[in-house]
Amino acid sequence: MGMTVAEKILAAHSADPVRELRGGSFVNCRLDLVMGHDVSAPRAIRLFRAMGAKRVFDKDKVVILEDHFVPASSINSAIHCQVLKEFAREQELTHYYPVGTGGICHALLPELGLIKPGQLIAGGDSHTCTYGALGALSTGVGATDLAVAMALGKMWFKVPESLKVVFTGRPGPWAGAKDLILRLLGLLGVEGARYQSVELCGEPIENLSPDGRLTMANMLVELGAKCGFLADAKPGADLADADARYTQTITVDVTDLEPQAACPHSPANVTPVSQAGKVAVDQVVLGSCTNGRLEDLRLAAELLKGHKVAKGLRLIVIPATQKIYREALAEGLLEIFAESGAIVAPSTCGPCCGAHMGVLGPGETAVSTTNRNFVSRMGHKESRVFLVGPAAAAATAVAGYLASPAEHWKEADGWRS
């Protein structure tokens, strides 16, 4: 019997020779890459020292960066960044990226070329599953596992069973990768793939751009997944055996799919934007490791060009990495955002996790291209967050309420009132 993508990668990385793995078994594995940021790494570093470790297992395979509370939003966040800087110097890490040199972790690592098909990666962040877009088995871990991973370059895993999702049909003109993954979340719920590996395939997946692939893989953890892959015809992606075993195979028809919105307070509380009602909005966020890439900024700028942000609404634009920021600057995208009335912020997670640069007050509502909308996720417990793709975010910023471009935009004549 053949193996799934997850089973094959874990088998290939087993510290002891194995010919075959099955979901539910346990295995000790060698790691190709370990990542920590300014939230996860400081505690992991303390545990690293407490366990008596002196040196990381490989200075070229441990990545430390600043991305959540930077530029420092408090004295504590400044201290966290100091801890990272001192550790990186002490360990002579090749890959240390302080604020201004890198960006948001799950956009930065693929951009740097550090992610390759077939790798096994542990990261101190739940959205580490993003790298499955490039054929790597990547998963988020807690501080204790991160400390051990940095010291030994090894971790134990419970082999996940696998769920196969086949997308069919041709989405509508304004639906992108974010809408595909929101549609799946609406069908399966936040526990629909609990501790499973999710393999996404089908023509709509094959048609995604590299940026879109990363967007979809990023939110697989919202299904409860351990990891996931876009297992299509792209090089290095289709690693599963033809006779691999799955817990189930489901088909998702996205024919004429329109922009989707995850309504408060769950990423799985999904409805078409056109059916969500005329929700008044205080803030729109375009950014994060989900939708802060150049493709996302280009689409939003195309819709915003020549128009103003609605009176009383804040539009915060956050390019996901310093490189994306420079590219957006060179293309004139940042000028378009600034002229529309948006605030362009440095590359940071910032408002996504309620850190800074866009924290919500009581009763405020945000429409955001981020990945979570739990109670208090972006600020006050009485605030609300709707998750959308970049097209709906731009449309909302101009309209002043939750809106789809389909309501206001015609390619021939632009915006309509």
Image: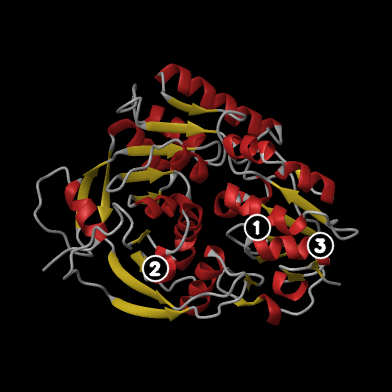
Give the residue pinned by disc 2: 194
Can you give x and y, in whole percent of width and height, for residue 156 in the image?
A: 26, 48
- In the image as oriented, which residue stretches furthest toward the front? 412
- Identify the amino acid type marked 2: Arg
**Circle 2 residues within 10 Å: few <14, some 14–19, many ≥20:** some
Query: Which of label 2 and label 3 is nearer to you?
Result: 3
Q: Amino acid at mark 1?
A: Arg
Could you tell me how far apart the alpha carbons at marks 1 and 3 are, in whole angstroms?
24 Å
Q: Name the secondary structure under disc 3.
A: helix
Foreground pick, 410 / 114:
410
- In primary-sequence order, the first of circles 2 and 3 is 2
Q: Is 313 left or right of 208, judged from the image as shown?
A: right
Q: Is residue 378 visible?
A: no
* Upstream in sequence: badge 1 or badge 3: 1
| Residue 355 image position (x, y, % from top left) | 68, 46
Front one among 265 and 136: 136
Does the residue at mark 2 contact the one at mark 3 (Cβ under 8 Å)? no
The residue shown at (62%, 45%) is 349
Residue 383: x and y in percent read 75, 63
Tag count in the figure?
A: 3
Q: Please, what is the three-letter code of the amino acid marked with disc 3?
A: Val
Label 3 CA crowd tier, 10 Å (few <14, some 14–19, many 20+): many
Question: Mark 2–mark 1 contact, CB under 8 Å?
Answer: no
In the image, residue 64 sits, relative to residue 177, either above or below, namely above
As drawn, 26 above or below 83: below
Q: Which residue is mark 3?
A: 398
Q: Secondary structure at mark 1?
A: loop
Answer with left or right where residue 85 lies relative to residue 319: left
Image quarter in which the N terminus is found: bottom left
Residue at (41%, 23%) from the top-left corner? 93
Q: Residue at x 86, y 56 (%)?
A: 308
